[in-house]
Image (spheres, helix red, strand yellow):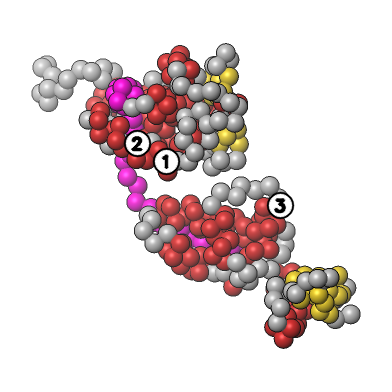
Amino acid sequence: MPLKLYKRSGGSIWHYRGTVAGRRIRGSTETEDKTRAQRIAAEREKREWTRHLDGPGSTLTFADAAIAYRQSGKSTRFLERIEDHWKDTLVASITDQAVKRAAIKLYPNAGAATRNRQVIVPTQAVINHCADEEWCPRLRVKRFKVVSKIKQPATLDWVNAFVANSSAHLGALCMFMFGTGARIGEAVSLTWADVDLHARTALIRQTKIGEERLAHLPPQLLAAIANIPSNRKPDDPVFQYLHRENVRQVWDAAVKRAGIAKLSPHSCRHGFATTMLHAGVDVKTVAKMGGWKDVATLVKTYAHAMGDRTVTNVIFGTNLAQPETGKAASS
């Protein structure tokens, strides 16, 4: 039977219900205007017939696609903002160029990497999840070109200077990222329930890849965390910051007091990888200890970080510390 309008007892909003193309349909029009409600119900009925005749992809909206994506247990990082942008846009009408325009609109002042990571990747993931269910075609979007920059990693000397010029919890936060490779978001999310001081471990929830890892706490880091003034309630954040944005201002102030290079919190993660690689730890172990899922990404980002061009001396068996005179060896 076609969709019929009705009001719930004591309510003023029109709802609809009925059977269309063999499917039981019900919902709210979210309006008190009966004429508008009739039009909304008619449009819903039309969509159901289109879906029945042309397949589910013909009426699939991004909102519906996102619900299915969430229900599958996929990562929802950056999803809310793009859901608000696309809303009930038909997936069939979302093209690669439309996604790139959305990225520019949502992040007008951001760089290419941010637009790729926070708009293109999640939008494509939602749609391609539905494609795997055979509800719609797959979407391919060409990424914005990212200009690679050599990133300056934090060093142990830099970290020690930072710690000496910051509060106990801010200094411990810096040392934690440097000592475990944790991202800033992962570090501020750490609670006392995640820390076992006796076992010298911390459970890090890796939001970027949707996994967890148990990190070892070296002695200096263990002492720094143990010395944070706190009641240590299980749900309390260890480093006393509720969000990564709360760190920015106090971080920059500590850097200024220390008179050291202005590095971001993420430079500590870079420092973890660089220091481990320079110490001769194999790349696979570094990736595992620091929570990199893709070893190739680790190599691409950090393999160049040694900086000292004289490292190529080892090819001829020359020590790194040996000065180069520029003169030919005597015969």
Residue 129 seen in render: yes
Residue at the disc numbered 1: 246
Q: What element carries label 2?
A: helix
Residue contact between numbered discs 3 and 2, judged by CB atoms under 8 Å: no
Q: Horizontal and vertical percent for residue 23? A: 85, 71
Residue name at image x 42 percent, y 32 percent: 269
CA neighbours of label 1 inside 10 A, class few (<14), some (14 to 19), many (20+): few
Q: Give the range drawn in magenta.
A: 137-165
Which of the numbered marks, if any, corresponds to residue 250?
2
Crowding at mark 3 (Cα within 10 Å: few <14, some 14-19, many 20+): few
Give the residue drawn at x 69%, y 68%. Answer: 60
Determine the secondary structure under disc 3.
Answer: helix
Foreground: 49 or 78?
78
Query: Relative to residue 160, is residue 4 depicted above or below?
Result: below
Image quadrant for the N terminus?
A: bottom right
Q: Based on the displayed image, in which of its 4 quarters is residue 145 positioned?
A: bottom left
Q: Residues within 10 Å of mark 2 (few under 14, many from 20)?
A: few
- The x and y percentages for residue 312 are 28, 27
| In contact (CB < 8 Å): disc 2 and disc 1 | yes
